Amino acid sequence: MSDEFKEDFLMHYGTPRHSGRYPWGSGKKPQRSKNFVSRVDYWRAQGKGDTEIARMEGISTTEFRKRLSIAANESKRADIAMAQKLKEKGMSNVAIGKRMNRNESYVRTLLKDGAEVKANRINATADILKDSVDKKDYVDVGAEVNRFMGISENTMKSAVKMLVDSGDYDKVQLHIPQISNPLQKTNMDVLVKAGVTQKEVYDNMDKIALPVEYMVDGDPKERRTIKPPVQVDPKRVSVVYAEDGGLAKDGVMELRRGVADLDMGNSRYAQVRIAVGGTHYIKGMAVYADDLPDGVDIRFNTNKHRGTPMMGEKDNTVLKLQSGDKDNPFGAYLERQNSYKNEKGEKVQGALNIVREEGKWGEWAKTLASQVLSKQPIELAKKQLNLAKAESDEEFETIMNLTNPVLKKKMLLEFADGCDADAVDLKAAALPRQASHVLLPLTTLKDNEIYAPNYKDGEEVVLVRFPHGGRFEMPRLRVNNKNKEGANVMGANAIDAVGINSKTAEQLSGADFDGDTALVIPTKNVKIKTSAPLEGLKNFDPKATYGYHEGMRVMTKADTGKQMGMITNLITDMTLQGADDNELARATRHSMVVIDANKHRLDYEQSYIDNGIAELKTKYQGSARGGAATLLSKAKSPEYVYRRERKGQWIDEETGEIKWTEHPETVTKTKVLKNGEVRTSTKPYKPVESTKMYETKDAYSLSSGHEMEEVYADYANYMKALGNRARKASLSVEPAQWNRGATTLAYKDEIASLDKKLDDARRNAPLERKAQLIANQTVRTKKQDNPELKDDKEALKKVKNNALRDAREVVGAKRQAIVLSDREWEAIQAGAISATKQEAIFKNCDDDALKERAMPRTSNGLTTANKARIMAMLDAGWTTSDIAEKFDVSTSTISAVKKEGA
């Protein structure tokens, strides 16, 4: 070695696996090297697995991989430095390889352009994270954040570990309740400076940032779409009181057509809020009118009487008082705010704050609730529940025929959970052509008429409004689409609205026209029963009979749901057990008081006494305290269980039932104080709420023996069994084969494309976490400013929905479904994609599109399950043409199925 080289290197005989003159580990017990990699190499040479080595090192396998990655990175950097130094001294690649005891190809790799940058990724990532924490204090380093930084998950974890090991930084884990479901937690790893506590991070969770910018121009407010409302001058508003015709259109605001700041765009009707004078607002359905008096742009119809001030105090006012929330003083979830261009051509915010507009009511699920069907003839209930079974059987057969094993297993498990939920919900299949529509008032219609453009002129329909008391609340009407008022107000092609008069609305348990909806059911081929309004309900006005008086207790919003559930269950139990009209009228009157008790400050306690509710509870539910007495009311009644989860092999191989791993009834926590003292505390686990139907294995155990209950018990047990069958079937799905080599090479472009699509889809996860953080902090602030929110579940839900929607707008959180090309699907089916990656891809795809691709191509026509469902639909009153349209086949095909099944 030249003198020049001796200056640069200190050479010695020892190697990492030697101590002095003897090989390391040559004694009776292996000596412990200070070099982590060397120890790993030694134990691997002895045949030890990584899991066993991690245990010997006293660390977890995750920690093991992180340390190995960091060590490997440091080793690579050292190799690069040496190779470059030797190259600068004029040595050839072969000579460098010999010097480093490595082959020549490895030397070439080290010397490649960018090799140093590649090996230094962990350090570079750590530098970025350090800078982020120094600037932003709290930085999200959780799942998928690495995708924003263009690095691997392992690089991210290793960089975080390096910073934490330095002692200057800590990693804090948060469990943030999801806004829409507080029982579900969003887990988040946050990098902070050393000494920052978990509590401090919780208190500032809206300030947790990503290491890279996600905001538009660095300003999140630029993406906000909902702004503080425009305040309308009260002089532009007039009121139509009850005595002047306001009762016939209660809840409707009529807008002057052609006024820019009141323009609904392409809609003819919408549920809106309009802020007035900075203190009050109008709530209801908006339609256009052409007969407004001069100077008036908004005419509001109310059931309030003359003398009530338009903008008065809380209990004496037509318009509602705005809340203290300047951003959204209505408390409602706003879809959008209208805008228009002023004289200068500038975009200006309008006065309409739109909650829902034309076309948005028809999106609701089309099933038939048990509170309706259980009050109908048993034969009708059997038909609709049998159809629901047939639909589920068809879905199960479709999934079982899927050709992709990963997709098949995923959908079987999701289907099983859906069956369990169906057993609890007890919702039957929809009746033919039934749909939800928003109600609008038309004063020129007769009592037995309805304006319904989605239905045939002259056909008969029945209306149902929820909560549903009984057949006496179901008006039977004739469609009159020739009504001129309807065509003018709603248009001839109204997508999801119907027009009725105020008397019909009254029969619908006193429906208003401020956004109330009804289920419209055509009666052709359907034997649905209705009855005349109960005598005990005629001319009953809850507001007049039980209006506010000094000293009465006002029902809280938090208690409204509980009280409504109680009276609804009572009416259900009474109906099944044959209560007479007088008794049903008493219970229904009380339900009409309860539903508006908070909204209109009604004396529900006096109603409880006057209508003898305690007596009805004793007679039909066994005691004055009441309680669900039949399967229909018990199904969703709460049952509390200790926390549990699905772990390991959680499906019973014999039955398909879920095998829960239950938490203990108590939990012990250990805390080490600053003085070194160890303190332990034990507290009980808080039980979580389930339902009686979900927890029972046999639905008949909830039945009191009534025939209708038996029909529903049979359905619930059928769905429970089908769910277990699906879970059991998932255990038999063969694992997907990953055909590496030639197959992956043949689909390299498709693999790259799928990786890109999956990466884009996964990028939403950190944004959604950030949205949840911002929304949680917003809700926390609003709770502090409005302490009554904690007792007002309905208002709190609206606040949460608004907060989450706005937060998603701020950060740009939006789920993007992956759309697969034909070649990409071919690559998946050929095994070019691993099972783990397939699961991730399918999680971000549209299920219906996946089923379409994964179904085997056959020319055999309808399946056995298809035919069973068709027969059930025919039995339920569906026409041959309607069924043919639904299955996209000819009417002759449906006729052939009918003939075959006869």
Image (cartoon, grey):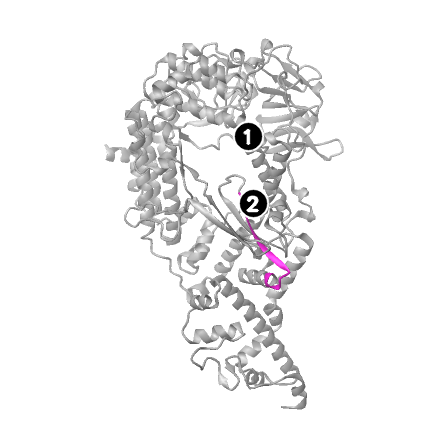
* Residue linked to disc 1: 791
Amino acid type assigned to the residue bearing label 2 in the image: Lys
* Residue 522 drawn at (x, y percent): 40, 23
| Kind of element beneath mark 2 | loop
* Residue 345 drawn at (x, y percent): 73, 34
The image's mark for residue 820 is none
* 155, 190: nearer the viewer: 190
Tell me if residue 103 comes above or below residue 121 in the rendering: below
Amino acid type assigned to the residue bearing label 1 in the image: Asp
| Kind of element beneath mark 1 | helix
In the rendered structure, does residue 190 fall within the stretch colored magenta?
no
Q: Give the range drawn in magenta.
A: 164-177
Q: How crowded is mark 2: few (under 14 residues within 10 Å), some or many (20 or more)?
A: some
In the rendered structure, does residue 166 fall within the stretch colored magenta?
yes
Q: Residue at x 33, y 56 (%)?
A: 734
Horizontal side, residue 465 vs residue 164: left or right = left
Q: Which residue is drawn at 36% across and 25% down?
A: 373
* 481, 673: nearer the viewer: 673
| Cβ–Cβ under 8 Å for marks 2 and 1 | no
* Residue 551 drawn at (x, y percent): 57, 15
* 353, 486: nearer the viewer: 353
Farthest right residue? 344
Q: Can residue 480 be seen in this view?
A: no
* Residue linked to disc 2: 814
Mark 2 and mark 1 lie on one chain; the one further toward the N terminus is 1
Farthest bottom residue? 2
Q: Look at the magenta stretch and give its main secondary structure.
A: strand
